[in-house]
């Protein structure tokens, strides 16, 4: 868990996320981003908090409610395997 002053790899990840979303939105109309989401993509840094979790087969994050301070957005990146998440 890291708050502020992110590592170089996290900053690169942030820049890659921004580029993928913006290029993907430009290329494909299927990515539906509202104005507030697009505005967030220009924030510097894109994110300033980071939590990295490692889950083994069959494990995952438990149901929970995020704090209101995260109301502007939460990003999720899954490496090395597919990930299905259900939000309610």
Image: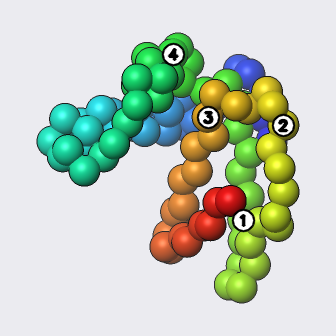
Q: Which residue is labeled 2 in the image?
A: 67
Q: Which label sits in the foreground, 4 or 3?
A: 3
Q: Which label sits in the foreground, 1 or 3?
A: 3
Residue lying at the far left in this picture: please name it.
27
Q: Secondary structure at mark 3?
A: loop
Q: Secondary structure at mark 1?
A: loop
Residue lying at the far bottom in this picture: please name it.
58
Q: Which residue is labeled 1 in the image?
A: 54
Measured Cα–Cα span from mark 1 to mark 3? 21 Å
As drawn, is 35 to the left or to the right of 67?
A: left
Residue lying at the far front in this picture: please name it.
88
**Disc 3 + disc 2, Cβ < 8 Å:** no
Measured Cα–Cα span from mark 4 to mark 3? 12 Å
Mark 4 Cα within 10 Å, few/some/many (few <14, many 20+)? few
Q: Which residue is labeled 4 in the image?
A: 43
Mark toward the start of the polypeptide (2 vs 1): 1
Q: Where 63 falls versus 13 (above or below)?
A: below
Q: Name the residue located 52 percent from the left edge and 63 percent from the top edge.
A: 79
**Residue 68 sits in which quadrant?**
top right
Quadrant where the C terminus sits is: bottom right
Q: Name the residue located 53 percent from the left edge and 29 percent from the top edge.
A: 11
As drawn, is 6 to the left or to the right of 63?
A: left
Residue 21 is situated, as x and y percent measured from the top left of the image, at: 35, 39
Quadrant where the N terminus sits is: top right
Mark toward the start of the polypeptide (2 vs 4): 4
Mark 1 Cα within 10 Å, few/some/many (few <14, many 20+)? few
Residue 32 is situated, as x and y percent measured from the top left of the image, at: 33, 42
Measured Cα–Cα span from mark 2 to mark 1? 22 Å
Measured Cα–Cα span from mark 1 to mark 4? 27 Å
Mark toward the start of the polypeptide (1 vs 4): 4
Q: Which residue is labeled 3 in the image?
A: 73
**Disc 4 + disc 3, Cβ < 8 Å:** no
């Amino acid at each position: 868990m890291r708050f502020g002053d992110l590592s170089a790899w996290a900053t690169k990840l942030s820049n890659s996320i921004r580029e993928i979303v913006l290029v993907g939105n430009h290329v494909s109309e299927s990515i539906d981003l509202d104005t507030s989401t697009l505005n967030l993509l220009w924030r510097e840094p894109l994110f300033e908090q980071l939590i990295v979790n490692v889950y083994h087969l069959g494990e995952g994050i438990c149901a929970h409610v995020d704090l209101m301070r995260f109301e502007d957005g939460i990003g999720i990146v899954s490496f090395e395997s597919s990930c299905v998440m259900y939000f309610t």
